[in-house]
Image (cartoon, rainbow, N blue to C red):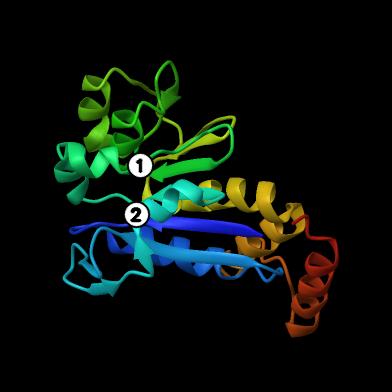
Amino acid sequence: MSKIAIVIFDDFTDLDLFLMWDLLNRVKVPDWSVKILGSSDAHVSKTGISIATHGRIEEANTADAVLFVSGGGTRARIADEEWLATFKLDPAKQMIGSICSGALILAKLGLLDGKTATTYPTVKPVLESLGVTVVEEPFVGHGSIATAGGCLAQQYLIGWMVEHLAGGNWCDLILKSIQPVGEGLFFEDAEDLTKLYATASATANV
């Protein structure tokens, strides 16, 4: 079973949650579970949308993979020692990633010690102030720890996670299925897509 946790908080960036949620739920393999976790029953996004959570952040400690979204709310979270202390994440057993300013949380949890990372350009000085060497790349991976910079860089972050947990066929499927029409679209018609899903389901590594 692969249990994936997406951690949110108040004032999170909408796209960071919704794109992660959509892409991860395109994977159709047995016992694939995706949950939105928070410290409350619901959290309000940057644009004012209230999103119900499926559980508390403590569940992230037993997930196979943990993803942190970004947004203005990260500044409050990295200053909240009680919130941070709730996490007992283990890179030896879990895949852990962030998008944009979510990297600030990884840094405060000590997960980026001695590692390079990427983030949103305006967040770079803050991340550097936490002792992290920031590089201008869309995706930076170090074993089971990864950061992505820029909302659309989620495709690399999610692809990295899906390839490790569900296999390369599913990674190809979910990433190529969101390509703009006319820009290397992966499948020509519904029949091709059906065949691709069948192949991915038959060979998924779970």
- Dividing the picture into quadrants, the one containing residue 32 is bottom right
Residue drawn at x 14%, y 44% is 76
Judge left or right: residue 86 versus residue 158.
left
The N terminus is located in which quarter?
bottom right
Q: Position of residue 157 (x, y in %)?
A: 52, 47
Name the residue nearer the viewer: 114 or 86: 86
Q: Which disc, if any, is residue 57?
A: 2
Residue drawn at x 27%, y 38% is 85
User: How busy is the neighbourhood of tag 2: few (under 14 within 10 Å), some, or many (20 plus)?
Assistant: many
Report the Cα–Cα distance between label 1 and label 2: 7 Å
Judge left or right: residue 33 versus residue 132.
right
Picture layout, residue 173 above or below residue 104:
below
The reply to whether residue 169 is in sight is yes
Judge left or right: residue 47 versus residue 133.
left
The C terminus is located in which quarter?
bottom right
Picture layout, residue 29 above or below residue 151:
below
Judge left or right: residue 114 versus residue 93.
left
Residue type at numbered disc 2: Ile
Ranked by sequence position, the earlier of labels 1 and 2 is: 2
Residue drawn at x 80%, y 83% is 191
Q: Position of residue 99 (x, y in %)?
A: 39, 46
Task: Quickly name the residue at label 1.
Answer: 87
Mark 1–mark 2 CB contact (< 8 Å): yes
Q: Outermost residue toward the bottom?
A: 190
Residue type at numbered disc 1: Phe
Q: Position of residue 139 (x, y in %)?
A: 49, 37
